[in-house]
């Protein structure tokens, strides 16, 4: 029994999930006895092979907040269809709160042209060539969520062809 637990723990350690902290903020709540301090961590989790998630964790200490953020990010994973050029199949926009994010595929060698939290989300999703712009807000949480929303709305050519009941070759006509 103990051996099996150890194996599963080792397997969990070897996984290829990467996590990056976008922001750590000290937040307070006013209670009867005064102010109660806690920390909020915004964490992006991804495997650089087409899966990414944005999570938020709150705790009395930074490490606890980051751990909760990672767990939350893994609950909110998004699958990203990537092209051969490690880009996205088509232009897209996403919304999160007051933030809008616009994304366009780019030619190989372009790199990730994006700012702030959107850049982190795209890098951990495995996107290598893309143009992105944050519109409306510079709040890192809303921008990260808007980027995840935009990536979630992507569809491959094969999916579109299947929906329309036509072969993929006819899409280009």
Image (spheres, rainbow, N blue to C red):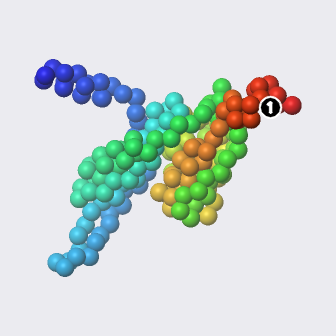
- Extreme front residue here? 165
The answer to whether 70 is drawn above or below residue 95 in the figure is above
- Extreme right residue here? 173
Which residue appears at 19% of the width and 79% of the height?
32
- Extreme left residue here? 2
Quadrant of image for the N terminus? top left
Quadrant of image for the C terminus? top right
Which residue appears at 40% of the width and 33% of the height?
17
Residue 157 in view (yes/no):
no
Q: Secondary structure at mark 1?
A: helix
Q: Residues within 10 Å of mark 1 (few under 14, many from 20)?
A: few
Q: Position of residue 116 (x, y in %)?
A: 53, 52
Q: Position of residue 3 (x, y in %)?
A: 15, 20
Q: Which residue is mark 1?
A: 171
Q: Position of residue 129 (x, y in %)?
A: 64, 36
The answer to whether 65 is drawn above or below residue 81 in the figure is below
Q: Position of residue 136 (x, y in %)?
A: 61, 64
Which residue appears at 31% of the width and 49% of the height?
68
Which residue appears at 63% of the width and 60% of the height?
135
**Image-quadrant location for residue 36:** bottom left
Label count reads: 1
């Amino acid at each position: 029994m103990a051996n099996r637990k150890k194996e599963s723990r080792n397997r969990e350690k070897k996984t290829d999930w990467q996590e990056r902290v976008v922001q750590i903020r000290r937040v307070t709540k006013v209670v009867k006895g005064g102010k109660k301090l806690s920390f909020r961590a915004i964490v992006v989790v991804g495997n650089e092979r087409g899966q990414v998630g944005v999570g938020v964790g709150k705790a009395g200490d930074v490490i606890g907040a980051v751990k909760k953020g990672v767990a939350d990010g893994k609950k909110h994973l998004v699958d990203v269809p990537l092209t051969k050029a490690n880009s996205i199949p088509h232009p897209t926009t996403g919304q999160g709160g007051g933030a809008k994010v616009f994304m366009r595929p780019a030619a190989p060698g372009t790199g990730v042209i994006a700012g702030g939290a959107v850049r982190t989300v795209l890098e951990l999703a495995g996107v290598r060539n893309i143009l992105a712009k944050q519109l409306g807000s510079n709040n890192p949480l809303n921008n990260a969520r808007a980027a995840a929303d935009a990536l979630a709305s992507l569809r491959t050519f094969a999916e579109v062809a299947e929906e329309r009941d036509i072969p993929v070759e006819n899409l280009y006509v």
